[in-house]
Image: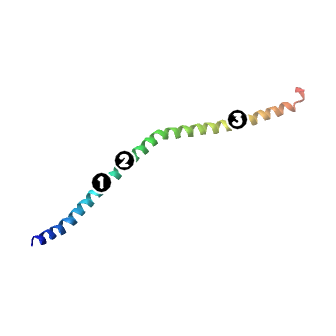
């Protein structure tokens, strides 16, 4: 009779202990994943705050460089045109 009681107690406590262990393991894994996610979000935020101004500066430098190249081409064409008029001028010889 006492052995029946121990057997029934074991049958009741085993699933309860397994369930509790599963809940604790799930809680631990969830907490670990949330901590990692917070860490990665913080790193991403810091990188965005650091590199966003640098990207803006790079785009500004690129646009100024393109403008400089266009102005250089226009000035070169105007200079060549002026030289052509001087080369064909009979008074300059």
Residue 67, quarter of picture: top right
The disc, 1 or 2, on the residue closer to the chain's N-terminal end is 1
Give the left or right position of residue 22, taking residue 48 as reference: left
Residue 38 has which mark? Answer: 2
Residue 51 in the image: state x and y as whole percent: 49, 40
Q: What distance separates the C-alpha of mark 1 from that of mark 3?
A: 65 Å
Q: Residue at x 30, y 54 (%)?
A: 28
Q: Is 71 above or below relative to 34?
A: above
Residue corresponding to mark 1? 28
Q: What element does badge 2 sit on?
A: helix
The nearer-to-camera label among 1 and 3 is: 1
Q: How many marks?
A: 3
Q: Nearer the viewer, mark 2 or mark 3?
A: 2
Quadrant location of residue 19? Answer: bottom left
Quadrant, the N terminus:
bottom left
| Mark 3 lies on residue | 72
Give the camera-side residue of 55 and 38: 38
Q: In the image, what residue occupies the spot 19% across and 69% down?
A: 11
Q: Nearer the viewer, residue 12 or 78?
A: 12
Residue 42: horizontal and vertical position, in percent? 39, 44
Q: CA distance from mark 2 to mark 3?
A: 50 Å
Does 93 appear above or below 74? above
Q: Are marks 2 and 3 in contact (CB under 8 Å)?
A: no
Q: Is residue 14 left or right of residue 54?
A: left
- Going from the N terminus, do you reach mark 2 or mark 3 first? 2
Answer above or below: position of 92 versus 45.
above
Q: Secondary structure at mark 3?
A: helix
Give me the residue at 45% from left, 40% from top: 49
Neighbor class of circle 2 (other Cα within 10 Å; few <14, some 14-19, many 20+) is few
């Amino acid at each position: 009779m006492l052995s029946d009681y121990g057997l029934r107690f074991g049958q009741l406590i085993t699933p309860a202990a397994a369930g509790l262990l599963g809940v604790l393991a799930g809680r631990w894994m969830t907490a670990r994943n949330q901590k990692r996610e917070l860490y990665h979000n913080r790193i991403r935020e810091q990188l965005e705050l650091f590199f966003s101004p640098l990207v803006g500066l790079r785009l500004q430098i690129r646009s100024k460089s393109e403008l400089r190249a266009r102005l250089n081409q226009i000035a070169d064409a105007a200079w060549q045109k002026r030289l052509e008029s001087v080369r064909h001028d009979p008074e300059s010889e």
